[in-house]
Amino acid sequence: MAHVAEWKKKEVEELAKLLQDYPVIALVDVADVPAYPLSKMRESLRDKAVLRVSRNTLIELALKRAAQELNDSNIEKLIEHIQGGAGILVTKMNPFKLYKFLEESKKPAPAKAGVPAPRDVVVPAGPTPLSPGPLVGEMQALGIPARIEKGKVSIQKDTVVLKAGEIITPQLANILNQLGIEPLEVGLKLLAAYEHGIVYTPEVLAIDEEQYISMLQQAYMHAFNLSVNVAYPTKQTIEAIIQKAFLGAKNVAVEAGYITKETAGDILGKAFRIALFIAQELPEELLDEKTKELLNQQAQVIAAQPQPAEEAEEKVEEEEEEEEKEEEEALAGLGALFG
């Protein structure tokens, strides 16, 4: 049996204990993070999480031991996500907050040849501090519309020079660095996170918060409307249900001509509109001055409304049909009252 160094045994033991002390275990890739930025990230993680960088093989052994100690085989699923220069990050922060925190902690970094772009790289339009030289021809060869203006290189329009996932070429890296464009990011890349028996990948954790908030708001409104429409009382809907019931009862009372303190104004208003409609059909000599004035005011209001001719005609027809219906209902009601 090959001899195992004591420091390796101790390292696995310490890592396994660390894994057991926190509810959330994450794997992060620290391979491309320089020493100084990494030390700054450790400072930003203080009081939030504990970062421990170790060899991938030792991390794998620690995960197996922690899974055995906690009697939770799901922890071992993290082993499938070990890659690059892995590190262990343990915390009490839930995986979604942890992912968001790590993403927001990333800093821009200069272009490096052979590295994929994390997102689309755009060379913005406008003047640059660069003096004329061979670089202008190199830019044009890459499709960047550059020309000399007032002794400096100027970009004529915003240009996407690289799509997300495409590899940065040495020539493009040189141009981007001279333009001061930093397309890369330095930070801890989350590989996977474990909590309560579930392993979360970055694709699951990268949620659009605004979209989810909008979806929740829509779901709330749909549930609210359903509750109101079926008269299912809750703390949130009881007021709207009562208001709906009140308005329904009021409308029935108004249509039936049942006078109460709440309906008197609407019933009189309806009767007034019917009276005006009838007055429109009478000869002018039968009308008093007050009625003529009211009809004139009504005509002015209708004439002042800015509508296309066709829409106005359609609206007038609809109003006339509605008024005729109201008149018929009113006359029917009068007939019922007086036999």
Image (cartoon, rainbow, N blue to C red):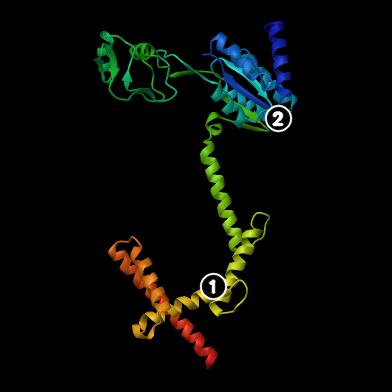
Residue type at the position of mark 2? Asp
Chain-order first, disc 1 or disc 2: 2
Is 193 situated above or below 140?
below
Q: Toward the viewer: 139 or 259?
A: 259
Measuring from the top left, give residue 182's x and y in whole percent: 43, 17
Is 311 situated above or below 279?
above
Name the residue at 28% across, 12% down: 152
CA neighbours of label 1 inside 10 A, class few (<14), some (14 to 19), many (20+): some
Measuring from the top left, give residue 240's x and y in whole percent: 61, 60
Mark 2 = which residue?
72
In which quarter of the view is residue 166 placed? top left
Is residue 283 in view? no
Position of 15 compared to 28: left or right?
A: right
Badge 2 marks a residue whose secondary structure is: loop
Residue type at the position of mark 1? Asp
Name the residue at 41% across, 24% down: 165
Mark 1 = which residue?
266
The numbered disc on residue 219 is: none
